[in-house]
Image (tube, rainbow, N blue to C red):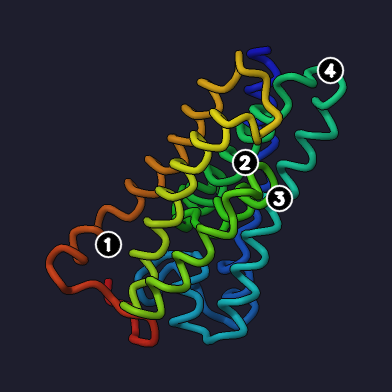
Amino acid sequence: MIGARVLAILLGYACGLLQTGYLYGKKQGVDIRTQGSGNSGATNTLRVLGLKAGLITFLGDLFKAIFAVLIAHLLFAERYPDAVKVLELYAGFGAVLGHNFPFYLKFKGGKGIACTSGVILAVCPQAAPICLVLFIILVAATRYVSLGSITVVTAYLIQAVIFGQMGYLSIDRAYLPEFYVVSACFTAMALWRHRANIKRLLNGTENKIGVKAKK
């Protein structure tokens, strides 16, 4: 099944290459990567181009990850029924990689939170409600989108393990450890991409939503 794993990641990466924020910005005559925080994700697009642009970017990034998962399901459900959830997760991770590191933009993309949210909805929807509630509460209380984002990916990993052990994920137990490892890769990737934000959070200098981003 190694070939299927690689194919799933590559298909996901191709889907992730649709850089919604960058493309929307270019249509407006703005290279989003040179504005604000220099990130092409939804948060920086929101800060630089406004609510409509931020929402369009978020939805575009969300659905490209969902689309990657659906493609993986269509390709592998019949051939690998016991492992299809894992292959869907690989496709989702590929979408995050494509979003974060698009080759045609010199590997300078977003931070993958909207994409990861799409993967959660498509692969582990049981975890979505708690992730959403935590995000809303934290961002509303602190105005730190980064804190909400970090919490989402951490909460997802914890729930993935809990639901897996409880048998709620419809995954053959032989593939559960791999599912957990790939899930942990989402969290590790998000934490690494937010390393500068984490440092600013600790220093009390993080950008708040509604305030123009600092480089």
Please report whichever mark, 1 or 4, sits nearer to the chain's N-terminal start. Answer: 4
Amino acid bearing label 3: Ile
Could you tell me which secondary element the residue under label 2 belongs to? helix
Amino acid bearing label 2: Gly
Q: Which mark is residue 197?
A: 1
For image coordinates 44% across by 54% down, the residue present is 108
- From the image, tell me which residue sits under label 4: 79
Please report whichever mark, 4 or 3, sits nearer to the chain's N-terminal start. Answer: 3
For image coordinates 67% across by 42% down, the residue present is 123
Could you tell me which secondary element the residue under label 3 belongs to? helix
Local crowd size for mark 1, using a 10 Å CA cut-off: few (<14), some (14–19), many (≥20): many
* Rendering coords of residue 210 (x, y %): 39, 87
Left or right: residue 3 versus residue 140 is right
For image coordinates 46% across by 41% down, the residue present is 157
Asked if the residue at tag 3 contacts the one at tag 4, i.e. Cβ–Cβ closer than 8 Å, the answer is no
- From the image, tell me which residue sits under label 2: 92
* Rendering coords of residue 83 (x, y %): 70, 21
* Marks 2 and 1, how far apart at CA: 24 Å
Please report whichever mark, 2 or 1, sits nearer to the chain's N-terminal start. Answer: 2
For image coordinates 70% across by 58% down, the residue present is 63
Asked if the residue at tag 2 contacts the one at tag 4, i.e. Cβ–Cβ closer than 8 Å, the answer is no
Amino acid bearing label 1: Asn
Q: Nearer the viewer, residue 146 or 138?
A: 138
Q: Which mark is residue 66?
A: 3
